[in-house]
Image (cartoon, grey):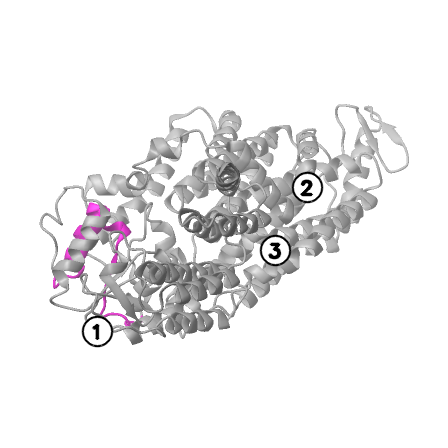
Amino acid sequence: MVKHDIDYNYVRPGRIRRFSDWALPIVVAITACILYIRTVAPSLYWGDSAAFAASNYILGIPHSPSFPLYTLVARLFNLIPNVTPAFASNLMSVFFASLSVMLFFMLIKQMTDVPLFLSSRRRKTSGERPVEINRSNFESVVRAVDTETISKPAVVILPCVAAAVLFAVSLPVWMGAVRAEVYSFHLFLTLTAALLAFHGTTENKKQILLLGLFVYLLSFANHPLLALAFALPFLYLLAINLPNLGWRLSTFGILALFLAISFSIYFYLPIRAAQDPAINWGRPDNFDSFFSAITRSSDMSNFSQMTAAPDYLFRLRKLGNFMAGQIGWPLIGLTLVGFWGIFKVSRRLFLFFPLAILSNLGIILWAADFNPRNLDLLNYLAPLTALLLVTSVAGVMYLLRSIIVATQASVAVTIVIGIFIYLGFQDNYARADLSRVNAPEVMCRNVVRDIPAGSLLVAAEDDLLLPLWYSAFVDSTASELKIVSAGALVNQKYRKQLTVQYPELVFPENFNGDTEFPAESLTVEMCRLNAPHRPIFVQFGAPGINHTDISPAGVLFRYNAGDMSAAEDKESYINHIQLAADMLAGNPNETSTIDFTGRWLFNAAVFYERSGKFGGSEVAWKLFNNALNIDRESIDMRIRLAVGLAKAGRLKEALKFISDALEIDPNDKNSLELGRSIVKAIEKQGAVAAND
């Protein structure tokens, strides 16, 4: 319970209240855990999840900032007997997401379950009439306030439970709970830190406050960018508590020690990197590489371009529309009202919420243009979702209880929350249910089946590369393949890692040096040098690889070094269609599988269209249509088709695909700009024809 800024007398809670204080959070956690276990991915998932599953098991170093705390904690989950490494990492997400929902419930209950005392008006509304407070009746009135809260625990517990359910089933939380990722663990750290810091502030308990600050500093060893979003709020809590902590050297010494301990976790990276694990991204075994890894500066070479005045209002509108689908415009709008309620609940804690909301919103808007298919950016929203719900529900509940009877206020808020649980649950369940997703494993099995041992495989996308890492470094089914990321060849640290990992390959001159090479030239040279020694297979779209360099071979393409004498096979595309069907069989509605499968078929269609062989345009349009039928929401594929048709002079056909793209998103800027240019070209053609 958060103490109000005015002191009040304590009334001993009844048995129901004492039971709810410790039992309900456990019930909330178990319920969330059941939901997440029911929908968790059974094994590998796409993208970074596959990389984390592999690196957690072998104690590798994933992409910067390398997440050392997450990797070390995840390794403990791999000690669970009779559980595959991939599922162990998924279970970690389930575990910490369930605890996060419990902590959210405790936090919102702490901010909601307060005595109703309006110090500014010096009156208390009992549900029937205002009672003026003076010295003679102060004790009895405040005791009545406490009694109202304590004797009717459902008064404040009911909307808190409803808010916890809404939080648990929101996509930012749910999608982080059902696959191997750093986000549920980070959410757990953030909410733990906030809960401890709030309790230490309101109860004036220095040790608990310092523990909260320590947990917050630990979160920097998990995900520095998300931790940075809470820097101002926690600095504010520290500032207001410094008079109680004491302006002593020992206080600042303890804080410095906490900071040193948190940062020291990063020293795991150079120690482990020096041992050359199979996954050693960025090789942070020296100072420059270490600094580059923890600051992610190697990923921000185009920093000026990243910050070149993006349309933040457009991003905010897209983000707002998504959040409205998760927690509803009413609850988002009531956040503004809730700020006043939070201020009335506790003037000391009040500023934490607007500072945290604005900081998190700024980080999200800066990070990228919001897209619900970008699961990383989606999970960035989990702390923001918690902040909005706590502010709107706790603040509005306090204000409503000053106007109407507490029970009526509780029921009203619960009904509003319940409406949005009902409206969003089915859609979110359909997307977050990964329990039947096996597409990454199906893809890996097909690749290993179709590619001879010892071959060099050049991947163009992480969704192919990273599941194959797991197959190579964990279950060893792909251990005989030499797997190279074409796009990462521009990174000197990655090139050095390849020379250590695959010494039997032939590398270009100065490959291991500091010379900067374009990815296109390195990819072509790697393939050319190794072609005499081993079979080479590439994913179409790898930089520098043209349609004249490859021919269909199973689910990928065989590098033939420009030899166009490959036998004509008009049925070769069937391998792609069959694999697409196999990958979608587990869950045909799962977004990431749809995204990869549609994009993979589309790129194969581009190959057939450009090559003119193996069935040419006829096969290409079969694959195009399959890709569009699989991914009905892809704007990018429709734009690419429109561009190709427009270049070929087929303007009216191109305009049809632009029209389809605008039906998906009427505000898509690329579609609008391309559509305008095509319309102008059609009008120009008409004017020329009329003149003729």
Q: Within 10 Å of the Cα at label 2, are there few (<14), some (14-19), or many (20+) other Cα atoms? A: some
Q: Nearer the viewer, residue 450 or 685?
A: 685
Give the residue at x 82% y 24%. Answer: 134
Q: CA distance from mark 2 to mark 3?
A: 17 Å
Q: Earlier in the sequence, mark 1 or mark 2?
A: 2
Residue 108 - label: none
Q: CA distance from mark 1 to mark 3?
A: 44 Å
**Image spot of residue 507 (x, y percent):** 12, 56
Q: Earlier in the sequence, mark 2 or mark 3?
A: 3
Q: Quick one: SS at disc 3?
A: loop
Q: Amino acid at mark 1?
A: Ala
Image quadrant assignment for residue 611 = bottom left
Provide the residue span drawn in magenta.
475-504
Q: Nearer the viewer, residue 67 or 637?
A: 637
Which residue was labeled with disc 2?
A: 329
Residue 676 position (above or below residue 538): above
Residue 169 - label: 3
**Image spot of residue 8 (x, y percent):** 72, 33
